[in-house]
Image: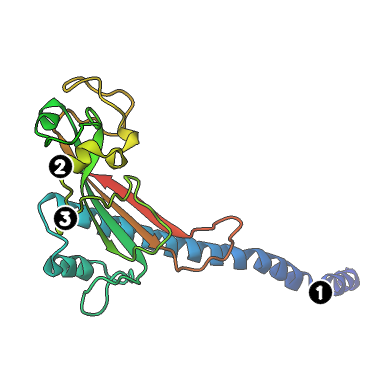
């Protein structure tokens, strides 16, 4: 028996090393994958937080065309690469935040349009104000469009323009049947003259892209309504 055990021991020597090598080959991608996913989750939560903060400030009347409010947002952005060490928002940074005010145009609104304009956007939701902060060169467009005609210094648009120019319409909100009836199948139902506020944030994902074929995360996009 001792001789048989000794022969068996010699024949099995090295098996543990082989098993460890095989297990290690699976463990390395698993650990790296979990690390990449964890970093991505942290970035996701950070983007979600800054987007909600920006939207909350916007709906409460914060004027983000003013440097003081921009610095507040820059300070709470943390290490997202959205602002410099003095809390100034970077135009070449890692993210862009778009703040939009929306309104359903109804009969009362169209009644106030100036002579020479036609209320082409009756019963439709349009952009009445929009402010873009950060790196506008990033390959991301607002879900509500980026109208430029009639833009004022505070981010608002002239009412005659957004009631007549069809490029201000947000198609996803549909066309209401009248001033008071609900619009079926829309993301957010607004009646004539009602407004809503939206905040969108897009940030690039600088964390490790270890498995692009499986987890190719180029950026994070968040949208919230108020």
Cα–Cα gap, marks 1 and 3? 80 Å
Q: Which quarter of the image is occupied by the C terminus?
A: top left
Q: Is residue 197 left or right of residue 79?
A: left
Residue appearing at x 16%, y 51% in the figure: 156
Cα–Cα gap, marks 3 and 2? 11 Å
List the residue tagged with mark 1. 13
List the residue tagged with mark 3. 152
Cα–Cα gap, marks 2 and 1? 84 Å
- The image shows residue 33 at horizontal and vertical percentages of 54, 62
List the residue tagged with mark 2. 159
Which quadrant of the structure image shows residue 21? bottom right
Q: Secondary structure at mark 3?
A: loop
Q: Earlier in the sequence, mark 3 or mark 2?
A: 3
Which quadrant of the structure image shows residue 138? bottom left
Q: Secondary structure at mark 2?
A: helix
Q: Is residue 69 above or below residue 168?
A: below
Q: Nearer the viewer, mark 2 or mark 1?
A: 2
Q: Is residue 170 left or right of residue 18?
A: left
């Amino acid at each position: 028996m001792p001789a048989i055990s000794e022969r068996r021991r010699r024949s099995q020597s090295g098996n543990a090393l082989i098993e460890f090598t095989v297990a290690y080959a699976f463990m390395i991608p698993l650990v790296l994958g979990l690390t990449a996913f964890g970093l991505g989750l942290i970035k996701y939560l950070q983007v979600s937080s800054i987007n909600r903060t920006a939207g909350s400030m916007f709906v409460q009347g914060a004027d983000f065309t003013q440097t003081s409010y921009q610095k507040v947002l820059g300070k709470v952005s943390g290490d997202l690469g959205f602002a410099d060490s003095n809390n100034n928002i970077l135009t070449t940074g890692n993210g862009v935040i778009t703040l939009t005010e929306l309104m359903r145009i109804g009969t009362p609104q169209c009644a106030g349009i100036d002579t020479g304009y036609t209320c082409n956007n009756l019963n439709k939701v349009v952009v009445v104000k929009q402010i873009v902060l950060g790196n506008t060169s990033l390959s991301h467009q607002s879900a509500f469009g980026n109208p430029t005609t009639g833009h004022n210094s505070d981010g608002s648009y002239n009412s005659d323009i957004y009631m007549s120019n069809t490029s201000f319409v947000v198609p996803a909100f549909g066309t209401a049947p009248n001033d008071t009836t609900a619009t079926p199948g829309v993301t957010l139902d607004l009646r004539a003259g009602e407004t809503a506020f939206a905040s969108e944030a897009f940030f690039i994902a600088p964390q490790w892209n270890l498995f692009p074929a499986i987890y190719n995360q180029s950026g994070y996009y968040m949208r919230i309504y108020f």
